[in-house]
Each structure stands twice: as C-alpha cells, then as structure tokens.
Amino acid sequence: MSYSRQFPGQARRPSPWAGSDHARRIQAREAAEPAANAPSKEELQTRIIAVQKVVQRDWDKGFLESLSGQLAKGRTLSPKQVETLIKIEHRNDPSVIEARNQWASNFTDEMREIAKVCARYYQANPPYYGDLCAKILNQPDFIPTEKQYRAMCENKYAMKVRAASFNAPIFPVGTLVSFRSTAPYGVKQVSTTGQAVVIRVDGLPVTSAAKGSKVYEVLPVGDPKTFIVEERHLKKMRQPKKK
C-alpha cells in the first residue's frame, strides 16, 4: 500500500472513515452517554438550594449563586462545575463537618509542634506546601485539616525530619567531638585542632531529610566562636588509652 506525502499548503485529505455511518454512530453514542447520566437542571437547582442553607465559605456562596443563576437562564452546567458542586456538598455534609470539628478539638500541642517542624523543613525546601507552611508558622491558632496534616507531616521525608528533630541526641551538651572525614571541607576547616565541644542541641531547625540531620552548635577547642554542624558530620572524640 502506498501513502501520498502531504506538502506545505496542500489540503489534508479527510480520513476514509470520516462521515461514515460507523463514525456517526460512535459520535452519537459518546454524546448521548454523558447526557443520560447527568442530573437534570431541576435536580441540580434543588441540590444547590439545599447546600446554600448550610454553606459557610464566601467563595462557595458566590459560586453557588452563579450556578443557580446559570440554571435559571436555562443553561446547562459544565462537568467541571458539577464536580465543584459535589465537592462543596461533601465538605458541607453534617458528618464531614462533625469529623472536622472533632479533628480540631483533638489537635494537641504535640501535633502543633510536629506541624511546625515539618513546616520549617518545607519552607527551607520549596516549593511544596508554601501557603500551608506560612499559616502554620505565622498564625498561632491555625489548625490544618486532617488531610493537610497527614500529607505534610506523615510522608516519608517528613518522618525522617521528625525523627531527626525529636530523637534523643547522640551527643549531649558537653560532649567532646571530632569531625568525620566525610564532613564538608568548610566544617573541618573551622577547627584547627579537629576537636569541639557540644554547646547546644537542636541549634537550628532540621532542614534536611538525610539520616543524622539533627543540628548542633559546637565550640571548637581553642576557638572562641561557635558554629552549626549536623550530627552526621560528628563523632565522639576518642580518649587516649592510659599506658
């Protein structure tokens, strides 16, 4: 079988199937299926009126008014509009509201601290959860939804950050430490002796999901200035064996 090449400016040849009875039947079936399953305008208007009685958000109120006006003019709603209506109905369902209120009442200080730790991590590693992080860190009374909390604070990266932040330190305050050979060049160059004393644990928020990312403030031996280093770059200073 040979195929003719189409040159610039040449009209595209229609498909041999275009306009056939088979193609028309497929198009008619595809057009009819959504219509058969879609709710009627009367049903949609009834649902809109019902949810308008309980809706709280200003945006939702305006959107529902727009849909109601559209239906009143005899126009149909798009699939996207119907999908948004379903979402509004769901979040205003009494059982959903009760679950949301129960979540808020059971939101503990410990959970708030976890949310702050994760928010600081994601704020230092954009672009994820930017708006949510800002609310958690800047609004003292803000409570994320259960979905938001689990998404931001219970993923595999957040769990590593939580472990680094809340686990007991390997090097308590006062521990004499040295720097691992794998430590960054800048860290090892700070101390001329290669030794330091831990001054503070959790010197800064954890901003890495790597193992051993707990942050310490250490004072190099013989140096008056402290600096920040992660736990994975430290090791306990071995005391010389007594002869």
Image: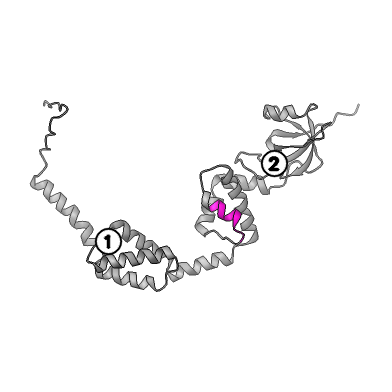
* Prevailing SS of the magenta stretch: helix
Mark 1 in CB contact with mark 2 (< 8 angstroms)? no
In the rendering, at what x and y percent does residue 243 appear? Answer: 91, 26
For mark 1, give the secondary structure: loop
- The front one of 91 and 75 is 75
Whether residue 89 can be seen here:
no
Question: Comparing marks 1 and 2, which lies closer to the viewer?
Answer: 1
The three-letter amino acid code for the residue at tag 2 is Val
Q: Residues within 10 Å of mark 2 (few under 14, many from 20)?
A: many
Residue 139 located within the stretch drawn in magenta = yes
Real-space Cα separation, disc 1 to disc 2, in angstroms: 55 Å
Which segment did they paint magenta?
132-140
Residue drawn at (36%, 63%) of the image: 63
Q: Give the vertical position of 171 relative to 58 (above or below).
A: above
Tag on residue 215?
2
Q: Which residue is mark 1?
A: 77
Tag on residue 101?
none
Relative to 152, 234 lies left or right: right
In the rendering, at what x and y percent does residue 129 appear? Answer: 52, 49
Residue drawn at (79%, 26%) of the image: 192
Quadrant assignment for the N terminus: top left
In the rendering, at what x and y percent does residue 20 appear? Answer: 8, 45
In the rendering, at what x and y percent does residue 152 appear? Answer: 54, 51
For mark 2, give the secondary structure: strand
Compare marks 1 and 2 and give the one earlier in the sequence.
Answer: 1
Relative to 74, 156 lies left or right: right
